[in-house]
Amino acid sequence: MSLQFSSLFRRSTALASLLSLTVAPIAGAAPSAESDWASYGRDPGGARHSPLKQITPVNVGTLRQAWVYHMRPPGVTADTGPMPDGMRAKFATGFSASEATPLVVDGVMYLSTPYNRVVALDAATGQERWAYTLANKDQAPTRGVAYWPGVKGKGARIFFGTRSGKLIALDAATGQLATEFGEAGMVNMKTPEVMNGLRAAPLGMSSPPAIYKNLVITGSRVQEMPVKGAAGDVRAWDARTGKLVWTFHTIPREGEPGAETWEPGSAKSRSGTNVWTFVQVDEKRGIAYLPIGAPTFDRWGADRKGANLYSNSVVAVDAATGKYLWHFQTVHHDIWDLDLPTLTLIDIKRGGRTTPALVAMNKTAIMFILDRVTGKPLFEVKEVPVPTETDVPGEQPWPTQPMPVAPPPLTRLAYTEKDILDITPELKERCEALVKKLNVTPSKPFQPLRADSAINFFPGSLGGADWGGGAFDPSLNLYVINLNELASPQQLEQQPDGSWGMKGGYAYFADMETGFPCHKPPWGELVAVDVVKGTVAWRRPLGDTGHPLLKDAGITSAGGPFTTAGGLTFIGATKDQRFRAFDTRTGKLLWTAELPGSSYGTPMTYAMGKRQMVAVVATGGFAFSPATSDAVVAYALP
């Protein structure tokens, strides 16, 4: 690994230099935890709610750009990775995509970039303090990094996993490797107990780890196919030394509870069942919550009959030891790639009593609200019969799936021919042609895939809910989340080795020329759920299609919102290159700013002295659109 320091602050705008003179924090002011955004979801439970309230529904319309930082160093081009030549030409903009949420602690912003670097910035001005460059074109998670405050004798550290499977610790003050951690600041996470004897199997990290006291808790990014690969186990490492402290087997080993939910022999060396998003932590109770995804292969399960624990489950473990406490499975025997991308710890206040709870959503946008101490649903959950008919030999779909009585499903879960987009004859003709080309057929909720036709599965591979997750305003009891409605026509075909895979690869029910989904709107919404009543408080279109007949359709989004005590919800997430603020209580759109690229990371807020600031990473590079920017943009009141 090589290290680069920048003392010239060359990557900030001229405006930042001016701001360093005019809006610097008050001299001698003590740092405040309320001023910071110290973890990916701000708090260890991921609620993404800030107590800051200088920016309000009354004055948010006067927000102005304060500074811009450009992540791409001079002379560096984008790493587009392997892709067809024709697509490479379309996406060869010189920029790379980011889904990052910056951290701010004591006036310093920490950020992973898509240019093989982790940087620290002056949060008031955007001026670069230090930059660490990874060797061999390795990449830190483009969703962000984690901050550990340190202990006596050891200063604060920045932790992140890499694409190649390294866990790295940096000194937060200097950006140098924390050499007492692991071997010269690094731990190789590709250890024999998780690699299943497959040395070449991929294992890395796409999201930042969680921090609990002096532990760094890591999920992983592994393959979706083929079946055999690295285990998706969750592990905890000593933040001081790098020593492995505990491992939780996300697929139970022989003799462990849950092993009986797998067909004998089917769990051996199987990959998937990993936490590719975010472990959340209840620090007060010492509990870590693991949102575990689908097993490999996630569209076919004839070789893994059973409910398949702990896939698609929230698993609560003792954060200090990794000991199992309880689990709740949101999908049995997943054959749709539904994962469990959204998990948020919340406190529900009603009748003078506070209930520690959590919100869990798989990609169907079915919301489960659970007591986070016991794992019991706070609203009744029923096992509902679902279709099981399929022409795929040997497949045994699970006959029921869990469905809460409340809240209701937040997106549509079925498709019929009457749903096809028909606002103009031209669009209807294009969409009918797509139906014919892909052999699209209707679907019911949890319809098993087939070999003779493409099941138009809702909400699709991008999910109704996805890794962006939601934000919780505790004063209003409102959980706010952005949701997609974009179907995925999915069809299976047998592979040369006898297994079954996707025919034609991943597809979306959308016209690629216009970018419009081929079913009637809505396509993208911002939704607020009252977690006390279990009802939808409001829903608003999110994003602008640019079409006069589709003003309220909304568009596909990725990334999430945050809320503030000032009564605001901020979100980027849409491909129209806009950053928006809504009134959290009513859902009214209050402010819109144009970005240099769409923001597919979750924005955040912090304070410098007496000034509240809002920051967003805006690169584009999602949903079949190229990356067009390398900007981190900060806003503040005049």
Image (cartoon, helix red, strand yellow):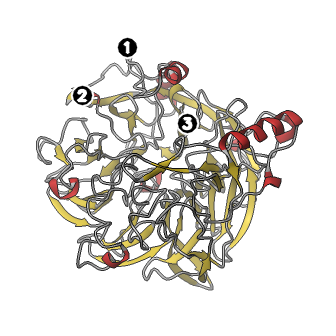
Who's the residue at 41% across and 45% down the image? 103
Who's the residue at 44% across and 69% down the image? 313
Q: Which residue is the site of mark 3? A: 622
- Tell me residue 27's x, y (percent): 40, 39
Which quadrant of the figure has residue 596? top right
- Tell me residue 554's x, y (percent): 74, 45
Q: Amino acid at mark 1?
A: Gly
Q: Amino acid at mark 2?
A: Asn
Q: Which residue is the site of mark 2? A: 136
- Tell me residue 592's x, y (percent): 70, 38
**CA–CA distance in space, label 2 to label 1:** 17 Å
| Extreme residue toward the top, this view | 75
Q: Evaluate whether residue 504 shows in this view.
A: yes
Quarter of the picture containing the N terminus is top left
Q: Which residue is the site of mark 1? A: 75
**CA–CA distance in space, label 3 to label 2:** 25 Å
Left or right of 172 in this view: 364: right
Q: Amino acid at mark 3?
A: Phe
Who's the residue at 67% across and 33% down the image? 512
